[in-house]
Image (cartoon, rainbow, N blue to C red):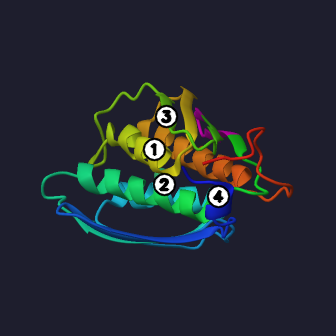
Amino acid sequence: MATEATVAAPSFVADVERKTGETDIRLSLALHGTGEVKLDFPVPFLRHMLHLFAVHGQFNLTIEADGDIDVDDHHLVEDIGLCLGKAIAEALGNKVGIRRYGERHTPMDETLARAVLDLSGRPAFVLQAQFTNERIGSFPTELVAEFFKSVANEGRMALHLAVLYGENNHHMVEGLFKAFGAALREAVSRVGGGVPSSKGVLE
Ligand SMILES: [Mn+2]
């Protein structure tokens, strides 16, 4: 079991590389950034969503990736989520001095989305949303849940997302990504002190 002594203090930056038979991904993340993005991979809707995530979280995010999208978008979307989650966990290290919790409601025109998260070290994921279209452009709507589940698992966070109401599916997903970015920004902010847990460890 890892202990505080063996896990580095938060650096707030991480580089992740992951190559499998299905996908090849290089991702760089700076959690205390300025919203600078460079996204180069063949899933346009996810590029749009991660751009919003980075801007609303004020993260710097670079992703160069390719994958077997001739099969479908599933593997690449899931694996980019895994890499983003891994980068978040690595960037936070032992979590000394961070806020830990974050939450945000985000309106997107007629839609209201909510993200609540705890960088607890224990992965959990809940999404409450009633999407009404199978696809948004060419993007399979069911991959929204797959993406965030990957982020929560590898980021070792409890992530609770909800679309409280809305009409337009593009707006619903946009609201979720913006709310997630803003909630994560709050959770990774520096508040000083030690590990924000009565157990003394958050891993
Ligand atoms: Mn849009």
Nearest to viewer (mark 3 / mark 1): 1
30 lies left or right of 76: right
Specify start and end residues of the magenta stretch as a single range: 104-113
Real-space Cα separation, disc 3 to disc 1, in angstroms:
8 Å
Real-space Cα separation, disc 3 to disc 4, in angstroms:
20 Å
Label placed on residue 136: none
Q: Secondary structure at mark 3?
A: strand
Residue at the image position 34 percent from the left and 60 percent from the top:
44
Q: Which residue is under mark 3?
A: 125
Please tell me in which quadrant of the rendered image residue 82 appears: bottom left
Please tell me in which quadrant of the rendered image residue 4 appears: bottom right
Q: Residues within 10 Å of mark 1 (few under 14, many from 20)?
A: many
Q: Earlier in the sequence, mark 2 or mark 4?
A: 4
Q: Is mark 1 within 8 Å of ligand 1?
A: no
Q: Which residue is under mark 1?
A: 153
Residue at the image position 52 percent from the left and 29 percent from the top:
166
Q: Give amino acid for label 1.
A: Asn
Label placed on residue 85: 2
Nearest to viewer (mark 2 / mark 4): 2
Q: Earlier in the sequence, mark 2 or mark 1?
A: 2
Q: Give amino acid for label 3.
A: Phe
Residue 136 shown in magenta: no
Real-space Cα separation, disc 2 to disc 1, in angstroms:
7 Å
